[in-house]
Image (cartoon, rainbow, N blue to C red):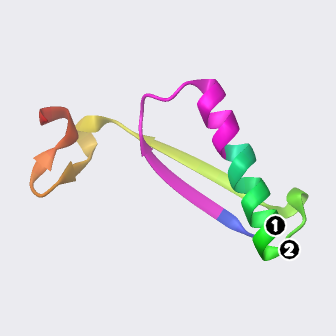
Amino acid sequence: MPIVNIKLIEGRTDEQLRGLVNDVTEAVHKNAKAPKENIHVIIEEMKPEHYGVAGVRKSDQ
């Protein structure tokens, strides 16, 4: 049972997230030969205030 965990900064539309889940599922199915019904995709959205690079929060850029 493949589990794919994707972390993103919030701000994508429901349509974009739906497409992402579909495309990731297809890629895992194709490359790992896993049945689609066994592929789990988890999307975790973060607030820009909760993510930083090189000591700077994304919300402060």
Q: In the picture provided, is 58 more to the left or to the right than 43? A: left
Q: Which labelled disc corresponds to residue 30?
A: 1
**How many other residues sit within 10 Å of disc 2, few (<14), some (14-19) or many (≥20)?**
few
Magenta segment: 4-20
* Pick the front one: 35 or 47: 35
Q: Residue furthest bottom?
A: 32
Disc 2 marks which amino acid? Lys
- Residue shown at the point (68%, 65%) measured from the top left: 3
Look at the numbered disc 1 and give the secondary structure of its residue: helix
Reply above or below: 37 against 16.
below
User: Where's residue 16, x and y in %?
Assistant: 60, 31
Q: Which labelled disc corresponds to residue 8?
A: none
Q: Splitting the image into 4 quarters, where does residue 18 fall?
A: top right
Q: In the picture provided, is 4 more to the left or to the right than 52? A: right
**How many other residues sit within 10 Å of disc 1, few (<14), some (14-19) or many (≥20)?**
few
Q: Splitting the image into 4 quarters, where does residue 48 fall?
A: top left
Look at the numbered disc 2 and give the secondary structure of its residue: loop
Is residue 5 a member of the stretch shown in magenta? yes
Reply above or below: 31 against 26.
below
Q: Quadrant of the N terminus?
A: bottom right
Disc 1 marks which amino acid? Lys
Q: Which labelled disc corresponds to residue 33?
A: 2
CB under 8 Å between callouts 1 and 2? yes
